[in-house]
Image: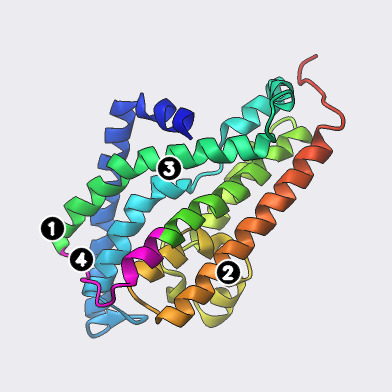
Amino acid sequence: MRAGFRRYAIYRRATLAGAFTNTVFGVIRVSIFFAAADASGGSVAGYDRAALSTYTWVGQGLIAVVWLFAWTPVTLRVRSGDVAIDLGRPVHPIAAWLAEDIGRAGQACLIRFIGPLLVGGLLYGLQVPTRWTTLPLFLLSAALAVVVSFGGRVLVSLIAFWLVDVRGVLTLYVLTSNVLCGLLVPVHFLPGWAQAFAYATPFPSMLQVPLDMATERYGDAESVALLAMQVGWAAVLLAVAVRVFDRGTRKLVLQGG
């Protein structure tokens, strides 16, 4: 975890540039959401302006924390054969990579999360929590979202054991996840059948669920059920990733020779 934190803390300018970019897109998104709410009589899909602002700015901050992109260094390590070094270490590579990713997420909280949230709160305001359980539920859900996201990303990355070029698969993964996780619009904006389909996948557990906690969309009992869903997806994805990795390393082929 310390290694992951220190590694990503080195890129200070990239961190600031990422926070600035997320803030700019946050302004665009919240303006569109406000226009939709005004056209619908002040709220849309159960979100009023305060909830939409909170959804937007907490979501913009979580993009880098949860890391809603498919690329991971695992892909390059598999393609180059450097993954063979990981096999000789005293911990399973999946566990080591997860620890590093948690450290990366911790570093992202300092600027990439707090920066857009502060700017958005000052410019547009945020929903004030009405229950003391909101903050701990959100923090726990966000931590689980990091693990679920890692499980999905590492699974896609491990396809490199069988494909020479995984960029097409990574692009498809990003397009699908961005729609179903609630990044582009809340999952609750989608038709009923699309919501049911989304919640049959792990993608809402990567972003929509933490944002539901932040906006207090559900009561405590329903929130705990959503946390249980996140735990389940995290366990399933990590177990499958371990299985795929172990199978992939039965025969290691170095690309290019």
Q: CA distance from mark 4 to mark 2?
A: 27 Å
Report the front residue among 186 and 122: 122
Q: Write the start and end of the magenta stretch as one range.
A: 125-139
Residue type at tag 4: Leu
Percent position (x, y) of residue 66? 45, 49
Circle 2: element type: helix
Residue matched to label 2: 229
Residue matched to label 3: 105
Circle 4: element type: loop
Q: Dot 4, crowdedness within 10 Å: few (<14), some or many (≥20)?
A: many
Q: Nearer the viewer, mark 4 or mark 3?
A: 3
Q: Residue furthest left?
A: 122
Q: Nearer the viewer, mark 2 or mark 1?
A: 2
Residue type at tag 2: Met
Q: Is residue 193 above or below residue 53?
A: below
Residue matched to label 4: 126
Magenta stretch prevailing secondary structure:
loop
Number of numbered discs overlaid on the protein picture: 4
Q: Is residue 193 above or below residue 149?
A: below
Horizontally, residue 123 falls left or right of residue 183, namely left
Q: Is residue 159 above or below residue 139?
A: above
Label at residue 224 = none
Q: Earlier in the sequence, mark 4 or mark 2?
A: 4
Horizontally, residue 94 falls left or right of residue 19, namely right
